[in-house]
Amino acid sequence: MKNILTTMIIFLTISIYGQKTIDFPSKDGLTITADMYEAKGSNQFIILFHQAGWSRGEYLEIAPKLTALGYHCMAVDQRSGGAVNEITNKTNAAAKTEGKQTGFNDAYQDVEAAIAYVKNTYNPDKIIIWGSSYSSSLVLKYAGDYPDAVQGVLSFSPGEYFDKKNFITTSADNIKIPVFITSAKSEKKSWSGIYDAIPSDKKQFFLPETKGNHGSRALWDKFPDSDDYWKVVNEFLKTI
């Protein structure tokens, strides 16, 4: 019953707020595909990045709920990915066709390009960046590399998933905006060093009392503890 209600809510929300697929270039010219979920009357954006091996389909259920809270959402296909929820990662497919590298590090330019696209196209009052698994590390890196570029960060299951030592932790040392980190209960050791390096007094984290889940899928209704994650996410968004 819960999943049926979720499907109905997603359909109604998309019908009311609107959803379309768009393309724009990455820094190296690769075409990036993204789904745009519009919240009428809002000038606030949340840019959503998926986890390893997946696509923008990770946010089919999540983005409509965020638009209902008053945020435009853009769910981005990064070049490092695959498919989820029957949505194929078109950016990854294009990168393979063009012979471009599709590693985690290679996707950082897609994060940079997506944020630049939203800034240049919409000039929003507020931009919040949101990542899942490897991309949750990249949004933390971005917030450290560009300290004044966005207004908040949500990071679901970050870690040092990269070849370079302390690739994320080094950048995290420069973050000064509100940051929220969460994960499955067992994953804290993967990101505690990154969290400790963040100097911002506006940082917070959440660990569920249950086992929890890896990445943004922790918010999917199919998981009994998703409401616990949503509660703290909503509270954090109100602080930005």
Image (cartoon, grey):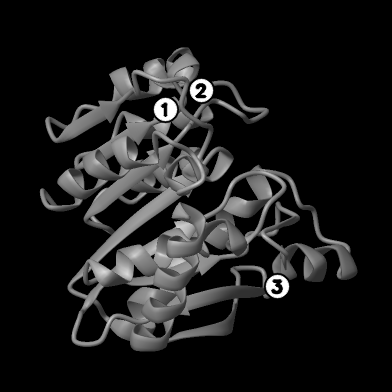
Mark 1 lies on residue: 170
The CA distance from mark 2 to mark 3 is: 28 Å
Residue 175: image location, x then y, percent:
27, 38
Near-viewer residue (208 or 145): 208
> Which residue type does callout 1 highlight?
Thr
Tag in front: 1 or 3 = 3
The crowding category of the residue bearing disc 2, from other C-alpha atoms within 10 Å (few below 14, some 14 to 19, many at least 20), is some
Residue 186, compared with residue 201, is above or below; it is: above
Q: Position of residue 194 (x, y in %)?
A: 39, 23
**Image quadrant assignment for residue 37:** bottom left
- Drawn side of residue 197 relative to residue 29, left or right: left
Mark 1 element type: helix
Observer-nearest of 8 and 118: 8
- In this rendering, would 71 be left or right of 22? left
In the image, 212 versus 224, the foreground residue is 224
- The residue under label 2 is 166
Residue occupied by mark 3: 30
Q: Residues within 10 Å of mark 3 (few under 14, many from 20)?
A: some
Identity, as a three-letter code, of the amino acid under mark 2 = Asn
In the image, residue 17 lies at what x, y percent? 34, 84
Please say if the residues under marks 1 and 2 sit with CB atoms less than 8 Å apart.
yes
Q: Residue at x 29, y 80 (%)?
A: 39
The reply to whether discs 2 and 3 touch (Cβ–Cβ < 8 Å) is: no
| Rendered residue at 27%/28% (across/down) | 205
In the displayed structure, 63 sits above or below 161; it is below
Q: Earlier in the sequence, mark 2 or mark 3?
A: 3
Residue 175 visible here: no
